[in-house]
Image: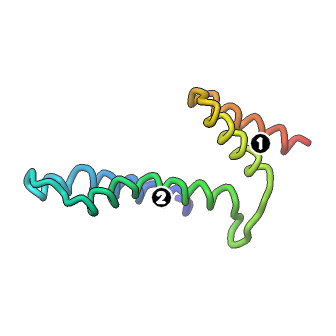
Amino acid sequence: MSDPWLLVALIGAATIFLRGVVPALLGGRPLRGRVLGAIELLPPALLAALVATQVFATKSVLVLDERALGLAAAAAALLLRAPLLAVIAAAAGTTALARAL
C-alpha cells in the first residue's frame, strides 16, 4: 500500500473512531464546545492537506504542473455550484488536456 493510500486509510479509521466509538464511550454526555468544534473541523482540514500534498508535491519537491490546473478548474466549477460529477469531469478534463499539450 502506498503512503497516500495508507494516509487515507488512517484518516478513515480515525474518523470512524471519533464519530462512532468516542460518543459511545462518553455514554451520551455531550462534548464541550471547543472539543466538538475541533472534531468537526478535523476531517475537512485533513482532506485539504491531502489534496494540497498530492497536487503541489512530488516526493519532497514542490511543483506547479498540470494537476494545479485541474484543481483550479475544480475550484471554478465549485464556485459556479456545479454538480459533483461536473466538478470531477472539469478537473480531469483540464488536467488531461494540459498534459496532452
Tag 1: residue type? Thr
**Location of residue 13 in the rendering, given as x and y in whole percent from the top left corner:** 35, 55
Give the quadrant of residue 32. bottom left
Q: Secondary structure at mark 2?
A: helix
Give the quadrant of residue 34. bottom left
Tag 2: residue type? Leu
* Marks 2 and 1, the one that precedes in the sequence: 2
* Residue of label 1: 95
| Residue at the (79%, 49%) spot, across then down | 66
**Location of residue 40 in the rendering, given as x and y in whole percent from the top left corner:** 35, 53
Give the quadrant of residue 27. bottom left
* Residue of label 2: 46
In terms of depth relative to the viewer, which is nearer, 74 or 98? 74
| Residue at the (69%, 38%) spot, across then down | 76
How is colour applied across the structure in the image? rainbow
| Residue at the (68%, 68%) spot, across then down | 59
**Whether residue 101 is situated above or below residue 44 in the rendered picture:** above
Instruction: Quote the CA–CA distance across marks 2 and 1.
Output: 23 Å
**Location of residue 5 in the rendering, given as x and y in whole percent from the top left corner:** 52, 55
